[in-house]
Image (tube, rainbow, N blue to C red):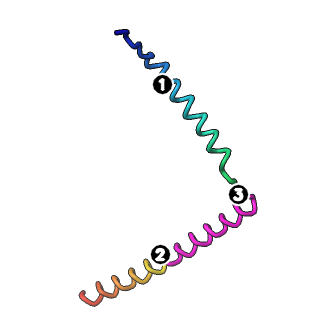
């Protein structure tokens, strides 16, 4: 029987790294990138949502603080 010689670790690893980047480049060519107008629109939507959620959290905190203060004063 003939012995099958394995490649050394560096050669195997380097081959896998090269294959990864080739496949990465191939996949990135398939991506449909958004237009600057779409990016701006999506950014504004995210900022608006963050502001709305922030206001709701602030209101909840204010009401909770008022309720806790009322309870503390009630049982003093």
The circle drawn on residue 13 is 1
Q: Whole-Å distance between the Cαs marked 2 and 3?
A: 32 Å
Q: Looking at the figure, which quarter contains the N terminus? A: top left
Q: Position of residue 33 (x, y in %)?
A: 69, 53
Which element carries disc 2, helix, strand or loop?
A: helix
Q: How many marks?
A: 3
Q: Residues within 10 Å of mark 2 (few under 14, many from 20)?
A: few
Taking depth in this image into account, of 59 and 53 the one nearest to the observer is: 53
Q: Dot 3: what SS?
A: loop
Q: Which residues are magenta?
A: 35-57
Tell me the crowding category of disc 1: few under 14, some 14 to 19, or many 20 or more residues within 10 angstroms, Cα based: few
Instruction: Tell me which label, 2 or 3, sits earlier in the chain.
Output: 3
In front of the other: label 1 or label 2? 1
Judging depth in this view, the residue of 28 and 7 nearest the camera is: 7
> How far apart are the two marked residues, 1 and 2, measured between alpha carbons?
50 Å
Q: Residue furthest front?
A: 1
Q: Nearer the viewer, residue 72 or 28?
A: 28
Residue matched to label 2: 57
Check if mark 1's residue and mark 3's residue have beta carbons within 8 Å: no
The stretch drawn in magenta includes residue 72? no
List x then y, in percent, for residue 4.
39, 13
**In this view, the mark in front (1 or 3):** 1
Residue drawn at x 56%, y 69% is: 50
Q: Which residue is mark 3?
A: 34
User: What is the chief secondary structure element of the magenta stretch?
Assistant: helix
In the image: residue 18, left or right of residue 34: left
């Amino acid at each position: 029987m003939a012995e099958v010689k394995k490649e050394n670790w560096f050669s195997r690893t380097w081959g896998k790294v090269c294959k990864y980047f080739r496949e990465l480049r191939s996949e990135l060519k398939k991506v449909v990138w958004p237009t600057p107008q779409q990016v701006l629109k999506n950014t504004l939507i995210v900022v608006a949502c963050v502001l709305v959620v922030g206001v709701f959290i602030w209101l909840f905190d204010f009401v909770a603080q008022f309720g806790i203060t009322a309870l503390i004063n009630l049982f003093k």
